[in-house]
Image (tube, helix red, strand yellow):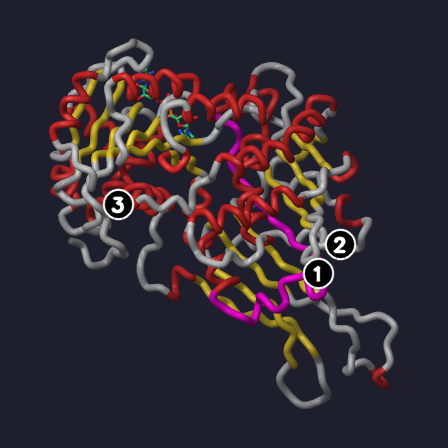
Amino acid sequence: MNEALPQSAVVPASDYVIIGGTGDLALRKIFPALLLRYAAGQVTDDFRLFVVCRQVISPEEFKAKLEPHCQPTLSGLDDGAGLLNRLMGLVEFACIDMSKPMSMTGLAESLMAKADAERPVIFYLSIAPSLFSAACQRIHEAGLVLPQSRLVVEKPLGHDRASSQEINDELLSVFREDQIYRIDHYLGKETVQNLMALRFANVIFEALWNNRYIDNIQITVAETVGAGNRASYYDNYGAIRDMLQNHLLQLLCLVAMEPPARFNADQVRNEKKRVLEALRPVRPENVVLGQYQEYAHEVGVPTTTETYVALKVLIDNWRWAGVPFYIRTGKKLKTRASEIVITFKNRPHDIFAKDGITDEINEIPNRLIIRVQPHEGLRLLLTSKEPGPGGMRLFPSELNLSFGETFNERLPEAYERLLMDIARGNQTLFMRLDEVLAAWEFIDPLVDLATKRIPLMYREGSMGPADDLLTSTGRAWFDPKEDA
Ligand code: NAP
């Protein structure tokens, strides 16, 4: 075991069946995460990892495809090459076409040979959503829907509420809700969970976390990359469905939710769902859609798909009445950063003003900045006295908590945590169906609006075209620092 890696709860030995195990997601995310958990001792030699795909692939070919994606991990470990070889010893291959009935019987024999109520059997659907229904049927007809079986699916789960309900109905015709793990990998990020610790393991912020003290909240998920080789997929989706429906709304829920009575899956998800249900439908004037200049050229045809969306969102409950949440996401922006900025209200009276009298308090407000990625951490912007004699001169100062520097160890990747939570049967960081549907309920009218509106063009390397959303209220976007 490598002591330099973070270690945590004991995970039961499991059978991980990765359907689509030779695809992009499996090679880039799933297997490298399993390798890191193997290095940390959570994945043990008693695990079995099944790669399911249509094309025949030898262990050597698979290892050659996987190795480049594991290089950053391997180079940082003692005996990285040996570790990958040992992990490969846990991998078994099954050549199965999920669209063909009764094609899973051979795999079923291998799985049943070790079947045990304490040994989770995890089916990870790393295939196109159009195959989800067929895959569930194969698992069912092979007799593999056992009490200890679990199903893992990734977004996109549909393109609107109705299609999401349809796909989920298909999953639920075979698996129970408590067996289904819907991944939004943002929820596996260290800082996203730290947001819950910050709010619910401390008293100082929670006391201020309401419309009495907070002026506005901004959530930015900015990417520097464009649609690139995903352009054909992305063009059918756009920023609203690709990012807003899931990642941004999840961050919004975690910032705005009430404290659950217990930190368990159902209570956390109940509170998140209440936030989604309290969202006020967004008026068209509070929506800005953008498209980066090169996008249509990349897609190869004229298109009005939005690559940027910004909204002013209001939450109709006692805590948040009147507090605007400004949320934005886009591609080809200036900085790659995901950040939540809580801006507090100004002090009610300025004792430092000349003669103690002032009509307007001109100051930099306190801000709490939660950096989700990269360089995870927290910054608290305060006002201090400038050192030295000669009067009370105020200047902005900063408390800075960089998680990377404070915790002298590597922060685990989101997939590492999520894969281990699935094996441990902990659904807290996965989306429940009613949450997914409540998110679509909010999103459907925005998608409809996007079909009728031409997006504003924005320059690559800018922060998008939504400044006017705030300037009319005297506020401005608080852009992520590039070197934060
Ligand atoms: P991909 O690169 O196209 O890989 C698809 C995999 O599915 C391959 O292993 C392929 O094996 C297998 N497959 C295709 N048809 C099959 C069939 N009939 N029976 C059995 N296996 C079959 O796709 P991906 O990008 O990894 O995406 C997988 C899923 O994750 C999709 O639902 C996608 O929306 C979701 N997702 C992906 C990413 C990402 O970063 N890639 C991010 C979020 C969500 P063969 O080549 O042998 O056919």
Residue 432 seen in this snapshot: yes
Drawn side of residue 42 relative to residue 252, left or right: left
Kindly identify which residue carries mark 1.
211
**Which numbered circle lies on residue 322?**
2
Whole-number angstrom distance, CA of label 2 to CA of label 3: 47 Å
Which label's residue is closer to the chain start, 2 or 1?
Answer: 1
Looking at mark 1, is its residue's CB closer than 8 Å to ligand 1?
no
Asked if residue 312 lies left or right of residue 22, the reply is: right
Give the amino acid at mark 1.
Asn
165 in the magenta segment: no
User: Alpha-carbon neighbours of circle 2 within 10 Å: few (<14), some, or many (≥20)?
Assistant: some
Q: Position of residue 81 (x, y in %)?
A: 15, 41
Task: Report whether the residue tagged 2 is closer than 8 Å to ligand 1.
Answer: no
Classify mark 3: residues with Cα within 10 Å, few (<14), some (14-19) or many (20+): some
For the residue marked with disc 3, what is the amino acid?
A: Thr
Percent position (x, y) of residue 304?
Answer: 67, 22
From this view, report whether residue 371 is shown above or below residue 424: below
Q: What residue appears at the point 42 percent right and 46 percent down from the top-left corner?
A: 429
**Stretch of the chain drawn in magenta:** 201-228
Residue at horizontal 16 percent and vertical 32 percent from the top: 115
Q: Of residues 72 and 273, which is closer to you in this image?
A: 273
Labels 2 & 1 near each other (Cβ < 8 A)? yes
Q: Residue 314: where, in percent of width, then height?
A: 71, 47
User: Which residue is under mark 3?
Assistant: 73
Q: Is residue 361 found left or right of 395 in the rendered image?
A: right
